[in-house]
Image (cartoon, helix red, strand yellow):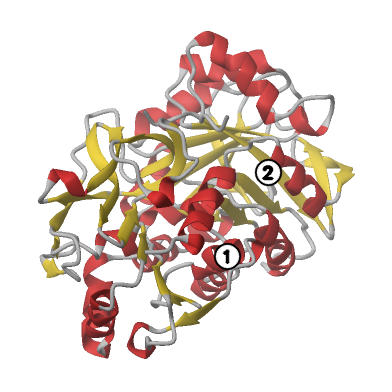
Amino acid sequence: MIAVIDHTYSNIKSICNSLTFLNASYEVVKAKDLSKKYSKLIIPGVGNFSKTMNNLSSTGGKEKIIEFAKSKKPIMGICLGMQILASMGEESGTTEGLNLIPGVVKKINTNINEFLPHIGWNSVKINNSHPVLDGIKNEMDFYFVHSYKFCPTNDNNTIGESFYSENFSSIVGKKIIIGFQFHPEKSQKYGLKILNNFCNWKN
Amino acid sequence: MLKKRIIPVQLLLKDRLVKTKSFNKFIDVGNPIRSSKIYNDSDADELIFLNIDRDERSIKPLIKVLEEVSKVCFMPLALGGGIKNIDDIKFLFRSGADKVIINSEIYENYNLVSEASNLFGKQSIVVSIDVKKNIESREYFLYSSCGREKQNISLTEHIKKCELSGAGEIFVNSIDNDGLMKGYDIDLIKSVAKNCNLPIIACGGAGNFNHMKEAFEKTNVAALACGSLFNFGDNNPIRAKSFLQNYNLNFKIVK
């Protein structure tokens, strides 16, 4: 059973619709209610780093997610859900993240003709093979919506890279934790393929 | 590299999809759920739904479609037409919308944009602007309420206020060119681009792929939206992209 974290303002409907479409068994839960019955965890995103982390800290959800990670069960973060895997975030002041993948979340440096948020389909260069990326070719396009980027401390935690004004990590991973800056649930066929791979991933 | 986008626009009237000419003359073009499935298969980059029912200015028709469409379309869904307040916006996001499109209400209340933008992030707030050109003065005038009410604010000032309030994208629709299939209003797109640092989605007038080529080449528009082009004739986003890729325009790769 996959747990899908419900945090206040994220659009969890689309991730749920895609899991239903893939016939995956899942439940939507608040982070504070995470328990041993779940075999995998999806942290969806959209929202503000600091608001989301403050909410997770004050409700006790933060500890629950960290505890879940210690049990060595697969975790997938999407968009903001990927960014909060970092040690620290700089959106709306400096806030501590879940610190599951060392790194800092910073604003994207844009050129004069490139606006934030970075919205739309962009290609992903895959640096390291990964079971969740099985069947995903290099330089495929996925749907992005974000203004901040995850800067991992260790280069080898960057699984995939994309370019918007600068190179940034669009897929991060460490052991059984993987994070996507783009939205697999909104990226049609290959996005669903990634989600399906995650559902079938055995560590 | 960030790709250009092609977005089919689906106009909702009661339970049906329609196409308009200059915001009037409604022609039935099918069932919204069925056509969304087809767009999902034919490689559209995003879908826009607009409730244009003048007797039903609420989000009810949008919710109905959204509940079905979000089960079968795994791409960004943007919806608008009838949004009045922050509760409407919350409800749309809860029902599976990725972006909301706000138009008429903004002229009365720019705070709606800031409030929504603060809650959901600016990436999810699209401001839609309906524009008519005065033939003699060549000046642009803004209209609300499905093109029926003329607004006094200038295009420039309105865009600036929307951007400051936290809009994430500007959807600009030419009332004059709507449904005529004679090409986009390039000057209009340029006027919008000159006044904001936001991605622009242009709509109104696409009749063939050359019209799209012209708009992509002459302006820095991020996305082109079209209705008639895909509703009438044997065209779809795959064909549009195959044509446009011959001119160094880049679209998403899914093969």
The picture places residue B39, in percent across and down from the top left corner, at: 71, 41
Q: Are marks 2 and 1 on the same chain?
A: no
Q: Is residue B208 above or below residue A196?
A: above
Tell me the quarter of the image containing the N terminus of chain B: top left
Q: Is mark 1 on a helix, strand or loop?
A: helix
Q: In this view, does B226 lie above or below A198?
A: above
- Residue drawn at (23%, 74%) of the image: A53
Which of discs 2 and 1 lies nearer the camera? The answer is: 1
Instruction: Give the label on residue B40, or none.
Output: 2
The picture places residue A126, in percent across and down from the top left corner, at: 34, 36
Residue closest to the eye, B246 or A61 = A61
Chain that bears disc 2: B
Q: Can residue A61 be seen in this view?
A: yes
- Residue drawn at (54%, 19%) of the image: B215
Chain that bears disc 1: A
The picture places residue B21, in percent across and down from the top left corner, at: 79, 34
Check disc 1 and report the residue beneath it.
A19
- Residue drawn at (79%, 39%) of the image: B20
Residue type at mark 1: give it.
Answer: Leu
